[in-house]
Image (cartoon, helix red, strand yellow):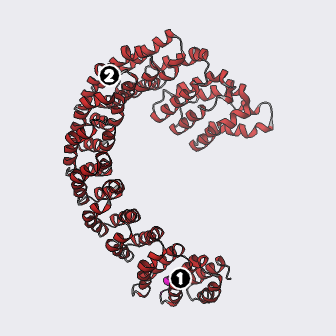
Amino acid sequence: MSKMAGADGDDSLYPIAVLIDELRNEDVQLRLNSIKKLSTIALALGVERTRTELLPFLTDTIYDEDEVLLALAEQLGSFTVLVGGPEYVHCLLPPLESLATVEETVVRDKAVESLRKISHEHSPEDLEAHFEPLVKRLASGDWFTSRTSACGLFSVCYPRVSKSTKSEIRQHFRTLCSDDTPMVRRAAASKLGEFAKVLELEYVKSDLIPLFAALASDEQDSVRLLAVEACVSIAQLLPQEDLEKLVMPTLRQATEDKSWRVRYMVADKFSELQKAVGPEITENDLVPSFQNLLKDCEAEVRAAAANKVKEFCENLPADSRETIIMNSILPCVKELVSDTNQHVKSALASVIMGLSTILGKDNTIEHLLPLFLAQLKDECPEVRLNIISNLDCVNEVIGIRQLSQSLLPAIVELAEDAKWRVRLAIIEYMPLLAGQLGMEFFDEKLNSLCMAWLVDHVYAIREAATCNLMKLVERFGASWAQSTIVPKVLGMASDPNYLHRMTTLFCISALSEACGQEITTKQMLPIVLKMSEDQVANVRFNVAKSLQKIGPVLENSALQAEVRPVLEKLATDQDMDVKYFAQEAMTVLSLA
């Protein structure tokens, strides 16, 4: 291999010789680096030597660490130009074929991905002469690894080959669907939908439907659940009249499968299935199936189905939507509200509010509101938060007054929860709630909570509460801040606890811009300046940081007359940190 670069004594190729030597080095990292620079090596060698020397060398050395092989499989996918363009692209097939048969799944998948990529660059003749034989070799390989790789390649070459070759490809796919090894059947099942999309409709019906039915009743649940995914693609391809006969029996069987994983997959894909089979089958078949999934004995299945409630209801035929929801879906939803599993309740809480827009004001108040309120009182914080974060859609339908009477106790409870992360999450929803409730209502009920968070014993809460105040001022305006927030914040400046005094400074820094120049100069600045004489060094250096932050809001005269003397004094403080931050503030504000 070293003769590849060095024999003709060309100095410009010397670094390439080093890279090539690294390809053989014992150190994995060096080999990996060299593989990642493979395109550089190929460029230096030129297209002919890349084809005749580099690619054979790479094909022969495929017995390396998985990490190196993965990098190689990825590189080869974009090598077409480096071997001389599409007419020579078939030269890349031998190394990729070897990589598609290795034991490590990630490497095989990457090799298949690169093969799929370069398949489009083959001319139809080359595809038939070089690519299709490779697929056949992989499909009839002794090891299951090569047969699983073949499954991912059928769909890319099928549309572009001759009629007789198409027939062979279909036969190979049939064989792999009934392979003895579950891994191969799993690979075939995962590509079933993709293959169906490139097949002619007559063959979908004659060849693929029997395979689909067989895979959907495979002894391995990992194969059956992949067949459910394929069901969506197949149903989209078939005309309406064939669905009942060809797809529905298999789908009905899957919704009642003995393995919860298969039922979970049906629940997870339910909206897509619903769109694929159309309104009539949905009404007759899918509604009862959906009810069963919502009542499933496994929590994972119920949670997956609960997640789809809103989508399923939105996609129901408009003329019968309300009747179906009220008679068939709502009774199941009511049971889920008091489910024993918190994941199920949480999944439902994240979508249930969306039903209000579908059912309208009267039904929401009568049927849904009691459910929302039950969830707001749920012992699981995540359920309560999911309801609170989706309030806006109910607000649009019934108005916030109706909600607020029952909503507030739940919010107050969350705001005082023992777990600080729960308190943190509710703080993040405060600006949203403020916008929904309006200023008057907010002041009356929630303002005191927001102030209480400023003196929480957890720093993350105090920090979030400061940020929350800034967002509230942005929403309600400076005059609201002046009358409601600023006096309370400034009152904390003389708190005996230095942490609370520091919170005052954090709030002033956050609020100055939103409050504007007048409030900052007249009300906030005097307090900050006064605090520069605090006994605690941490407070003093935060005074310097706050002055730096509010400086740009102040007029230059105030900066010179009031801020400068204080910063100069702090710059001679005994504490190193106070000195540092005071000097930094002076530099930033151009007072130095």
Q: Quadrant of the C terminus?
A: bottom right
Q: Is residue 509 left or right of residue 390?
A: right
The amino acid at mark 1 is Val
Q: Quadrant of the N terminus?
A: top right
Q: Is residue 319 left or right of residue 539?
A: left
Mark 1 or mark 2: which comes first in sequence? 2
Q: Nearer the viewer, residue 168 or 433?
A: 433
Circle on res. 243: 2
Q: Is residue 541 visible?
A: no
Q: Magenta: predominant secondary structure element? A: helix
* Label 1 Cα neighbours within 10 Å, binned few <14 / some 14-19 / many ≥20: many
Q: Is residue 173 magenta?
A: no
Q: Nearer the viewer, residue 419 or 390?
A: 390
Residue lying farthest to the top in this orientation = 164
Span shown in magenta = 536-542
Label 2 secondary element: helix
Label 1 secondary element: helix
Q: Position of residue 49 (x, y in %)?
A: 71, 26
Q: Is residue 570 left or right of residue 506?
A: right
Q: CA distance from mark 1 to mark 2?
A: 73 Å
Residue at horizontal 77%, vertical 30%? Answer: 7
Circle on res. 543: 1
Q: Is residue 513 left or right of residue 339?
A: right
Q: Position of residue 544 (x, y in %)?
A: 56, 81
Note whether 507 is above or below 398 in the view shown.
Answer: below
Q: Position of residue 325 (x, y in %)?
A: 24, 41
